């Protein structure tokens, strides 16, 4: 805590201060979770070198709760493997940490998500290519480990979607389609999988299948803004698939700005 308070006093830029304040708030928010030798102090992540670069405050605060927990206890507590401390810990019964249950390989997923974050924000082309590769390697390893140790892992759709998205940015659209389909098969209510599936079909030049994928997602999953935007961009007509025509029309009318009478 003292380290972050000092860091805040020394960094004067607006974004640096905001990031530090978020980190302080996160520290206070997770103190109730501390038990035994398990740490939830995310300030301990800042400065740890993973994949050639130290973790920044913004990277630490942007991580999923489960990845914060895992990486803190994997990297910042004396080098002990996180699984030994957390596998039977009651923290994993909480929804935000449940992804770690029966998933001793999950730190690879977290490393992959960190690489993904860096890929999107890195300006250097060489480093971007490196992080795109790291993102792929960690997700690919996570899937292989899952299939070997826990093939019915309830979050496997998340892994497949991540790999599909990586293939999309690697311009390997056929492979992206395959992984996105696996995600849909694993969990038909995961909207991100349909979004990536549609994007891959679009880049592959098949607009019809792209729209079919969005239609499927709107019918079977939650109608996210991403799915609705793709539906409109692909020429879909209201009402959205799976919605009551009258209800949909009313909502669209209410959401539209009032027409000017000038």
Image (cartoon, helix red, strand yellow):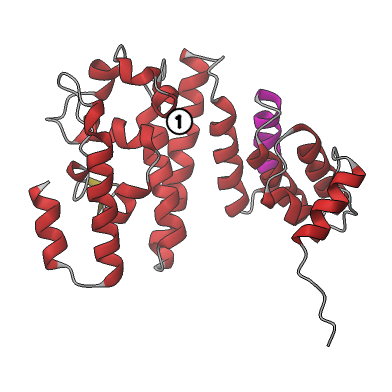
User: Seen from this angle, which residue lies furthest top?
Assistant: 88
- Residue 11 sits above or below residue 229 on the image: below
The answer to whether residue 140 is above or below residue 224 is above
Q: Residues within 10 Å of mark 1 (few under 14, many from 20)?
A: some
Classify residue 234 by image quadrant. bottom right
- Residue 134, x across and y down, in percent: 41, 45
Q: Residue at x 65, y 35 (%)?
A: 179
On the picture, is 9 further left or further right than 252?
A: left
Pick the quarter of the image with the C terminus. Answer: bottom right
Q: Nearer the viewer, residue 213 or 169?
A: 213
Visible in this render: residue 87?
yes
**Residue 154 in the image, given as x and y percentages of width and height:** 55, 20
Residue in the foreground of this view, choosing between 209 and 240: 240
Q: Main secondary structure of the magenta part?
A: helix
Helix, strand, or loop for circle 1?
Answer: helix
Q: Residue at x 13, y 59 (%)?
A: 7
- 120 in relation to 162, above or below: below
Give the residue displayed 66% in from the left and 26% down from the top.
Answer: 187
Q: Which residues are magenta?
A: 176-186
The residue to which callout 1 is attached is 141
Measured along the vertical axis of the image, is residue 69 above or below residue 199? Answer: above
Q: Position of residue 203 (x, y in %)?
A: 73, 56
- Front position in the image: 70 or 23: 23
> Does 149 sit left or right of 169 as displayed?
left
Examine the rendering and report whether any part of residue 204 can be seen.
no
For residue 164: magenta? no
């Amino acid at each position: 805590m003292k380290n972050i308070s000092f860091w805040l006093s020394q960094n004067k830029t607006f974004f640096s201060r905001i990031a530090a304040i978020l980190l302080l708030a996160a520290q206070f928010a997770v103190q109730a979770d501390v038990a035994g030798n398990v740490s939830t102090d995310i300030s301990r992540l800042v400065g740890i070198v993973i994949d050639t670069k130290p973790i920044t405050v913004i990277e630490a605060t942007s991580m999923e709760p489960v990845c914060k927990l895992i990486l803190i206890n994997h990297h910042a507590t004396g080098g002990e493997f996180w699984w030994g401390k957390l596998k039977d810990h009651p923290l994993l019964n909480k929804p935000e940490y449940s992804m770690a249950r029966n998933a001793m390989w999950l730190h690879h997923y977290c490393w992959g998500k960190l690489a993904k974050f860096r890929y999107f924000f890195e300006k250097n082309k060489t480093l971007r290519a490196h992080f795109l590769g790291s993102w792929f390697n960690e997700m690919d390893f996570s899937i292989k480990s899952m299939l070997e140790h826990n093939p019915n892992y309830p979050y496997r759709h998340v892994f497949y979607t991540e790999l599909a998205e990586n293939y999309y940015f690697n311009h390997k659209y056929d492979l992206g389609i395959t992984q996105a389909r696996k995600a849909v098969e694993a969990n038909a209510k995961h909207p991100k999988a349909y979004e990536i599936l549609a994007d891959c079909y679009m880049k592959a030049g098949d607009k019809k299948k792209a729209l079919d994928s969005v239609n499927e997602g709107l019918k079977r999953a939650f109608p996210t803004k991403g799915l609705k935007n793709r539906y409109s961009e692909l020429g879909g007509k209201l009402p959205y698939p799976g919605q009551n025509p009258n209800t949909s029309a009313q909502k669209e009318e209410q959401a539209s700005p009032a027409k000017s009478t000038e």
